[in-house]
Image (cartoon, helix red, strand yellow):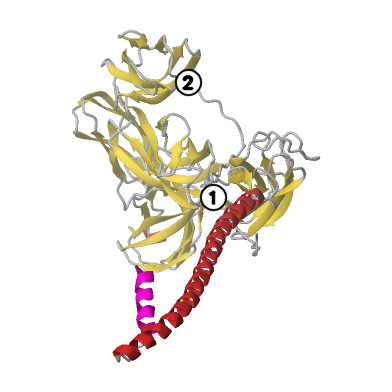
Amino acid sequence: MWKYWFVVLLVSTSCIFNLPYDAFAQTKMYTIPTPNIFFTNVHVDANPVPDKPFTVYADVQSQSVNWSDLIVYMTPPAGISVVSPIVSSLTFTSQGNTMRASWTMLTSDTGSYHLIITAHSNFPLDTETFDVTVNVGSPHSIVLDGISLPGNIFPNDDFVASIKLKNSATVADTNILAQISVPAGLQLLDDVTQSVSSLDPGKEVVLKWRLKAENAGSYTIAFSYSSTNAGSNSASSAVNVGIKPIATGALLSLVTHSTTLRPNSINPIVVDVQNNGIQDIHNLQLVSASGGGYVSTNTPLWMGDLGKNEKKTLTLQIDTSNETLPLQIPIVVKYDSDGNSYAETYQTGLQLENHPDFKINTVMVSPPLSYAGDTADKIDVQIFNAGMEANDVYATLNLPAGLSPAWGGATSVYFGKINTFQTATASFYVNVNSEIASGNYPLSLLVKTGDQQTPMDVNFIVAPKAQFQLISEDDSQLYPGAADVPFKIVIKNIGTIAAQTLTTKLLAGNSVPGVKSDSITSVGNMEDIGTVLPGQTFVTTFMVNLDPAFMAGDKSTTVELDWSQNSTGMSNAFVGTVIVPYHVAYGPNYLMYYNAIPWTYVVILIALAVGLALFVRMRKKKMKMIELESLQLDRNYQSNLLKSEIGKEDVSAEKRNEKTGRSKPVAQDFYINAEKERER
């Protein structure tokens, strides 16, 4: 019955799901044990003095969820008594909560005392200690406010040397003692020691000594001073004694302005050069200013003529090569006066600013290059004090977004005391967020001592790293039971640096059973890619086997990428992963499936359904045609019959008409009546 054959072509379009991928970078540099208990802050009262109670407290934090029996106790040295309980039992309410243990102490003598604070917990078992140094009698309670030495001194002249001391503390100080040290060439006419019984807060006192100049030359006079609260300190200054007024005709005085010094750098030092003699000076030049760790970089300096009592100011550029520097610098001068030429060396005292002056010497990061995803990168900041001695020094590192402290938010370091020209190192450990962009991240370091706060900038650089993104995957040949079929994956390096010695591994042991490889059987397939430039797309193809019992449907697997950068060698220094979604069909791709039914069967069923519908339609059409043909035959038969009847009627009608005289044909009337009857 079929007259038509047809072919139905069905095209199936599969959807590719580009799911978000995760990239994890792991840098295995070294392992640093993470404590359960750590100290977040240890504080000592500012300016502790003898016979007055002072407080030490420690803030302790734990990272454990379930723990108990935490105790914190103090181990004081000889000379300090603890007037509060030595052992503190702390109870934490939640993980990361911070509690404080506090002790009140008392000592009768000035000095530096070493304390040990111990924190111990039983569940989990952990013991951590913190060492702190307490300086009783702050050096800032009695400070040097000036040294006075006259000019125009000649042999056999008497003169007065004096110092001014100030009590900068908030409590009165007692037993202020000052001593003078006079070198050969000068004679002391007073007692070595000058004393003051007490000095109220904010008050000053001037202590004087009479001296006599014996020989011409430049001499350094040293002063030492101490008090009950402040301990001891010292300072020095130079005085110049002329040879003979007539012989030399000149007497130079070299005085430096207050300055700060940084080691291993060029430091400007301003010097006032004055002619205190009775003759003019000609052709004056500073030949050099080197020695004791100092090297002048802009000498010789030409000054020319210097008249009587005339003063000129110049700036020396001094290179400091040592971390520990003396407070004097030798300056060599040459000049002509009264027809004679002279060459002299002056031990010139350096006047430091009357407060601590902190500078950053160096910043070192370990490992040398930091990348996104790094953990516990170490930042060592070397802090140099170019000013007065500082006590109770804290350094706090403020981290920008993307960087975080490696353990418990610890971003502060306690130094205790930093002496003049001393370098101290602050160490911090930071984690780098895996999503952070490469670039320079300025960190803010705040150094605090007493009321003085010194902000400094620390640069931290996050190096660029290759990053990978899934572009597409070809899973068209994956179905249960498939053997040695390709699984093709397209990946792009979206980072800003090339990936070297790149290899890819298909981590499909759980999601694609039966995967085997001669080179890495425990993980899956592995492929060597080589170098992939920034913005470059590459294809990695894995030959896989699927178990016949494997369930069809949408799945996902992981591709591991191992690579190196900056010619770090053949060993892979970086590891990342890309999530790859894929689809497992119900059978071979040439069949194509719809809800687990091969498309071939679906096509046959659809074709049968369509063919049946067409057959029914054509059958109905043919039956209708047969009916119409039958109806036409019937009409023809009736028409012929009608004609025969009409013929008979016509004959009889004509006869009747002839009798009646009518001319209308009878056949016409009969035909019209027959048509009306058929319509009814």
Q: Main secondary structure of the magenta part?
A: helix
Q: Which mark is residue 324?
A: none
Q: Separation of disc 2 and disc 1 at Cα?
A: 44 Å
Badge 2 amino acid: Asn
Q: Residue furthest right?
A: 518
Q: Is residue 3 magenta?
A: no
* Magenta stretch, residue numbers: 667-680
Visible residue check, residue 180? no
Identify the residue shown where x is 69% and y is 39%. 480
- Near-viewer residue (634 or 284): 634
Query: Judging from the image, what secondary structure is the residue with disc 2 in?
Result: loop
Which residue in the protein does label 2 denote? 36
Which residue in the protein does label 1 denote? 17
- Near-viewer residue (218 or 354): 354
Q: Where does residue 448 sit, x and y in percent of width and height?
A: 34, 36
* Quadrant of the image containing the N terminus: bottom right
Instruction: First in sequence, mark 2 or 1: give its number.
Output: 1
